Image (spheres, rainbow, N blue to C red):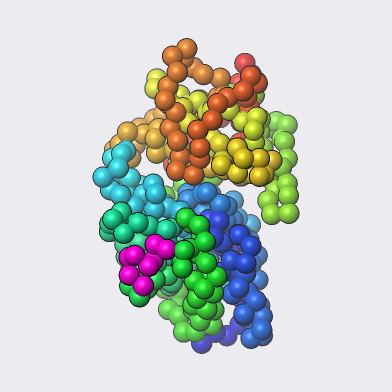
Amino acid sequence: MMEKPVIKAVVIGGSNTIIQKNYLWAAIKSLKEAGVTLDVIENHAVGGTNIFNGLFGLKRSEKLAEADVLIIEYALNDTPTYADDSKNPKGIVTHWSRCYEGVIRYAREVNPNIRIVSIILEAKTKPQARRLNHVYAGIHYLTAYYQLELIDIASPVLHDLGAERAFTNEVYKDGFHYKPIVVMETAKRLVRQLTGDYPRPVPLPDPLDPLHFGNASAVGTKDFNTDLTPFANSRFSVDTIELQNQDLKFTLEKGKLLALFYVDRLSGGVAHFRVNDLHYDSFMRKPSVRSEEYPWLLGMISTEFLHKNLVAEEEDRTYTLTVKPFMKKELKPFRPSSNVAHESGESPTLAFYGLLHTGKMTDLTLKSR
């Protein structure tokens, strides 16, 4: 049984973990009424991100070692990109599992006694579009292997209501968020999990995948000796580097870029990447910035599209990131699942605040144009 009147939590996840009156808020309220404090000492959840944002947040965490529990809510967000193994690039599911396993192993290496609770939520899914979800299956398997804790909401909703009813407004308020009846059930199950019996943390076993991303590195803007542009509101605070009149360059020895973290605003342009001698473009616009609902939002792109084979033996790669096109001939930009198409203005910029990568980084520079 639960022993502590205060439970310190670090949280990683998507918008379902930060929107108003979400399951976490409801769980905190319910626990408080029972005389238990769920103290969220760090919340790295960001809407429209995936598990790579979670790993980045943990790598930059200052309080992971103090936490009693790590709550992971990324199954819904990870599904569009990683749940279908027929998608390109090659090895997309393995790439995802290496990150999820990396989150688990890194958290336990920093804090051997931390509990790890994964939550599986599901986006609104048409019955004819249902398939075995490799993300859900992977979370179940990793939970069993590492003797962790799991709250699967998606399965009982589908099982109890059936595919047709589970696709209706009876369950969802929009395509990605449940109505209060499911939110409250999620909160109840989290409360029971946190206050009931749970598997005691055990020493880490051998990794399922020796190439997991637990040893990945996170680079923040304070690692640079340059002027920073701050962005802050009641929820987030980051310091960014503006790529308007300068380009970012670096080399990764036996590694690859996993993700780029940035602030999106209307002045933000299309991102242009060069990896060795190959060129790639990516849309960076968030829907709620395009609609001007928000003046800016935190964003991330996981960079699988830069690598044709995600499970190939690692090589040395030199990267350049810029908002100025490398070529006169326009490329068709990659569109991340949570982004929309957009144009670059006359003086585009890109305000980034972090990089996540494997391998050894060298020659990290900002080069003026």
**Span shown in magenta:** 161-168
Instruction: Tell me how many marks there are.
Output: 0
Q: Is residue 204 left or right of residue 69?
A: left
Task: Give coordinates of residue 109: x percent, y percent.
Answer: 48, 61
Q: Residue at x 66, y 44 (%)?
A: 293
Secondary structure, magenta segment, majority class: helix
Q: Residue at x 58, y 66 (%)?
A: 22
Can residue 225 be seen from the camera position used here? yes
Residue 38 to residue 82: above or below: below
In this view of the protein, which residue sits in the foreground, 95 or 82? 82
Residue at the extreme top: 328
Q: Splitting the image into 4 quarters, where does residue 288 fall?
A: top right
Q: The C terminus appears in which quarter of the rendering? A: top right
Q: Splitting the image into 4 quarters, where does residue 306 fall?
A: top left
Q: Is residue 211 left or right of residue 274?
A: left
Residue 238 falls inside the magenta stretch: no
Can residue 311 be seen from the camera position used here? no
Q: Residue at x 62, y 67 (%)?
A: 21
In this view of the protein, which residue sits in the foreground, 352 or 98? 352
Q: Is residue 13 left or right of residue 132?
A: right
Task: Give coordinates of residue 332: x percent, y percent.
Answer: 42, 25
Task: Give coordinates of residue 134: x percent, y percent.
Answer: 31, 56
Residue 237 to residue 364: above or below: below
Residue 164 falls inside the magenta stretch: yes
Q: Residue at x 39, y 71 (%)?
A: 157
Q: Splitting the image into 4 quarters, where does residue 67 fall?
A: bottom right
